[in-house]
Image (cartoon, rainbow, N blue to C red):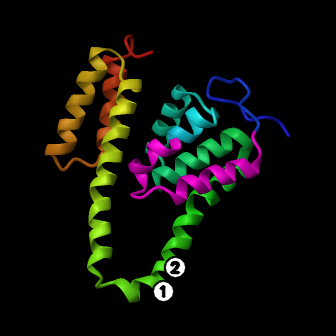
Amino acid sequence: MTVPKTLAGQPGPKESLFNILLTFLKVGAFTFGGGYAILPVIRQEVVFTRKWVSEDVFADILIITQGMPGQLALNSAIQIGVRLRGTVGGLVAALGVTAPSVIILLIIAAWLYPLYRDNQYVHAVFYGLRPAVVALIAAAAIKLGREILHGIRGIILCAILLVAAIVSQVHPILLLVAGGVAGLLVCRRECH
């Protein structure tokens, strides 16, 4: 079996399917909020703990997965799994990141929810998880911004797109397209 190549064309690390599965089972089992809230956990595991991809490759994976349909966490896991072990690695990573949620939801739906749906403590726990999810998303945005944004033009473009996202009803895909076009026109020299 050949080793998958990274974005730079260099051979990527060869990792066991079992380690890929365990890593993404851990990510899926201990992350609430999905999507952007799971990014700091994935980043910690694949960039810093396992050193499967570099910061730059992780940023590129996030850019690619933003343009793909489906969940960000699932798409990121698949991209990393494919990078490590090809198609089978992608399938194993997808299984790992989704299995805990499916199992937990089935247990809750079948047994726990009917027993505790009116319990004030359960409601309080979920109420407390909401700010934690927002904090994880904000932390991911700040960390990624520090690593991805280079130069004053990139920072200004980010600020303009952030304001547009907050104050308007512009679809996120249109913002991504606008950012890409603006990068082509304005940031070409500065952002490489």
Give residue 166's position: percent from left, percent from top. Answer: 18, 44
Secondary structure of residue under mark 1: helix
Q: Is residue 26 above or below residue 177?
A: below
Q: Is residue 30 above or below residue 118?
A: above
Residue to which mark 2 is pinned: 107
Residue bounds of the magenta highlight: 15-42
Magenta stretch: residue 70 in it? no
Q: Mostly what secondary structure, the magenta segment?
A: helix
Task: Name the residue rendered at 76%, 36% in the picture.
Answer: 14
Give residue 142's position: percent from left, percent from top. Answer: 33, 33
Secondary structure of residue under mark 2: helix
Label placed on residue 111? 1
Give residue 116's position: percent from left, percent from top. Answer: 36, 84
Is the residue under label 2 in contact with that under label 1 (CB below 8 Å)? yes
Between the C-alphas of marks 1 and 2, the distance is 6 Å
Q: List the single residue furthest toward the front.
A: 121
The count of marks equals 2
Viewer-nearest residue: 100 or 36: 100
Task: Name the residue rendered at 63%, 32% in the picture.
Answer: 51
Task: Name the residue rendered at 56%, 33% in the picture.
Answer: 48
Magenta stretch: residue 41 in it? yes
Q: Amino acid at mark 2?
A: Ile
Tell me the quarter of the image containing the C terminus: top left
Q: Is residue 144 above or below residue 133?
A: above
Viewer-nearest residue: 56 or 120: 120
Q: Is residue 31 above or below residue 100?
A: above
Label placed on residue 136? none
Left or right of residue 13: residue 175: left
